[in-house]
Image: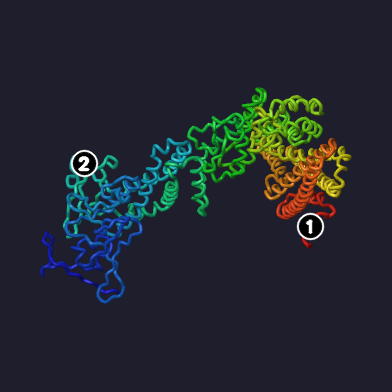
Amino acid sequence: MQENINITFPPQNNNTNNNNNGSTTKNINDGGLIGSGFQSLPCASDLLPSLMKKSVNRRVVTNPQDAVSAGDNIFNFFPFNNDTTPVIIPAVAKPNYVEIPEELLTRDIIYVFQGIDGNYIKFNKDINMFLIDDHATLNNHPIYISKPKRDLISRLCEFGWLFRKITNFINNTQFKESGLTNKSLCLAINDELIELYRLIAILESQINKSIKVSSPIKANNNNSNGILTAHFHTGNSNVVTAHIPATSSTPQQSNIINNNESNGYNESNLTLRRMFVWCQEPLQKLKLLGTLVDAINTETMKGGEILSVIESLSKHGDIDQRQMTFSMLCKVSQPLFNIIKIWIFKGEIQDPYKEFFIKENPKVALEKVWREKFTIVARLIPKFISTTTCKRIAVVGKSINYMKQFCERDVIHQIDMEAIQSKSVPLGYHNIEFLDEIIDQVSKQSSQRLLKIVINEFKFMEHCRALKKYLLLGQGDFIQYLMDLVAEDLLQPVQKVMRHKLVGWMETAIRNSNVQFDKPEFVNRLDISLLQDRPGSIGWDIFSLDYHVDTPLNTILSVNDIVRYKKIFHFLWGVKRVEYSLNSVWRKMRSSNNTLRLFNAYIATEIHQSHLIMNEMIHFISNFQYYIMFEVFECCWKNLENAVQHEAMDLDQLIDSHHQYLHDICTKIFLSNSESCYECFKKLLSIIIKFVTLQNNLILLSNALNNSSPQQEQQALLSKELLNYKNHLHRLYQDYTSTLFKFQHEISLLKINQDLNPISLSYMLDFNEYYLNKHLSSKDK
């Protein structure tokens, strides 16, 4: 049992009645430790050690009573006598200080709950927190609040601090006027605050009910002007009378209770502790709203960014928090879903504040309408809409917009009628799980219709087939006839190559080949284009066929696609030129067989060897062309047809299928996947052209020798020329065999490292392993 402790204080210079020996004695056990039991103590510094300075928000406060913030330890521990158990002693009132009654503090807390200043608790903007105004007075007396009450007030002020932050956010006019989503967010937050307004009203009504209503005709307590009178005990036991005006909100009600009246503030009244209990559940809601407000950058965030922040807060184990964020998302996301609905049904973007995740570029060129007019802004995509769904939404709206821009009026009317029938489909966050189903339903009415229009009316596949026939050399008779006509002109330097003459040759080739039976709408698109020349170039290096595509087809077959076709044509044209040169030199050697016999005495072996080399080169070119035309082109074309007929569900997938078609061609003919293979192949073509030139020179020399009888000087010159021929032929054949083996080796590596499947080309080029054995035998030597 704890012993009674009596503390004696020196007398004070006041009107308090003292005992006979001039001292005041107070039994601590009689008065208790908390409340008015210590109000008669003269000074806290007489009992307690000097208080430590406290830092509040990096602000050093010399008076510990200044700090009001949640979590501060407001108790001091001081052991009495030899007892090891510390006794909790509250802050003690100083002389002439008046302790504010709790009913006045509860009234102030009601103001704080609304984020405004009370009479004794005010907001400090410098440190961004509510503080008790210790400079305030009550009837010209300084105020005093015990530390337990200060701690409780600090915890209650958290409610008001959050409320003030949130109301400042929703009252930010610049933020609200910068987007429909921003306005919806502020309205949704305000709807959540309505419940808090009800709580504040209930608390205030409880305060009003618990306060003793004094009659204004009582002369002892009130005057005729509605002034309420109350009596307070000061720190030195004096009784102070306070005159407080009655407020309009609580007419004829006094917030001050006479200490001597038995019907004053009782246990059933609303206290700070009861207010603290009442506000715990709403405080959790305010904390959630405060977290949301802190996470939103009012200067940069809008649209889907804000929705993503709210959606991230819904990933929580608290059911109440999930329900609250769900309710807010349903309200805040409604402007976004309204924009989506107009977009997928009408193909229009009604987004004055640029908060939709699809951006419109009105100044884009006509041929780039499909690809660049509408772009997706990734940062504005809300987290609850997947990237795949976002792309599908973009395609559906683009399809309707594209049809309205390029299709006939009856098609547009039919689209509008289908959109009107589909507008009854509900769309919002409350049924977000059905968003994909709604997109599927609308896609069948827009994307599929546009796909059919492109294939049937725009004749997409027929244009691709024409490109395959002309630029990919699929029409063999036309290409061969054209090459026969332009071969002599293309041997000249680029300065002497005339485009109009080449166009004339092309028209002649069209009239003399099966191309003349093709539809004019495709044949008339053929043209000749000359590529950029380089120093030392001839006509073969700059010649190319061209295919003109106009609106609206050029939005699908873009300029870049035609450039890739021309790149493939240039490569194939080079291969065709080598084949044409080899065939020409073979015919010349056969026709010059009699004249070449004049060299039998000098180079009979080399002439025979040249025939063998020429046959090897023809074998290589023929098999490579077979690989390109059948293993590459036909297989890729079959894949394109399957993709267009069975796999493509919208125009984007159709375009992707065509891009994949061109990519596969470029990859399998070594234009875009292996630089080493391409370089080896170019070197092989160069060696073959050199061989053709060497053979042509030999034929010219034999014809010159046949037409004139050689003199003695000419015999010496002839011997020198034939010796050079031997040396060149030997070096060319060595380069050819080594380069061909390297090319085959690069193909085998390519087959292992990538899924290109050029295995058939390897077998065709060296089906009996002749070159492999030859290479191994040369290494052994």
State the residue position of label 2.
226
**Most distant residue in the bottom direction:** 82
Can you say which quadrant of the picture contains the C terminus?
A: bottom right
Q: Tell me whether the residue at label 1 lies in contact with that at label 2, contact meaning CB atoms closer than 8 angstroms.
A: no
Q: Position of residue 718 (x, y in %)?
A: 80, 43
Q: Position of residue 131 (x, y in %)?
A: 29, 52
Q: From what the image shows, is residue 684 above or below residue 581?
A: below
Estimate how packed mark 1 is, as few (under 14), some (14 to 19) or many (20 or more) residues with alpha carbons within 10 Å.
some
Q: Nearer the viewer, residue 21 or 460?
A: 460
Q: Nearer the viewer, residue 742 or 42?
A: 742
Q: Nearer the viewer, residue 588 or 504?
A: 588
- The first of marks 1 and 2 along the sequence is 2
**Most distant residue in the top direction:** 409
Q: From what the image shows, is residue 772 above or below residue 359?
A: below
Which label lies toward us, 1 or 2? 1
Q: Which mark is residue 153?
A: none
444 on left or right of 341: right
Q: Which mark is residue 775?
A: 1
Estimate how packed mark 2 is, as few (under 14), some (14 to 19) or many (20 or more) residues with alpha carbons within 10 Å.
some
Can you say which quadrant of the picture contains the N terminus?
A: bottom left
Can the viewer see residue 651 in this picture? no
Q: Position of residue 576 (x, y in %)?
A: 77, 38
Can the viewer see residue 88 in this picture? yes
Which SS class for mark 1?
helix
Which SS class for mark 2?
loop
Query: Disc 1 versus disc 2: distance between alpha carbons?
Result: 120 Å
Q: Position of residue 375 (x, y in %)?
A: 57, 37
Specify the amino acid type for callout 2.
Answer: Gly
518 on left or right of 541: right
Q: Residue at x 39, y 37 (%)?
A: 173
267 on left or right of 703: left
Specify the amino acid type for callout 1.
Answer: His
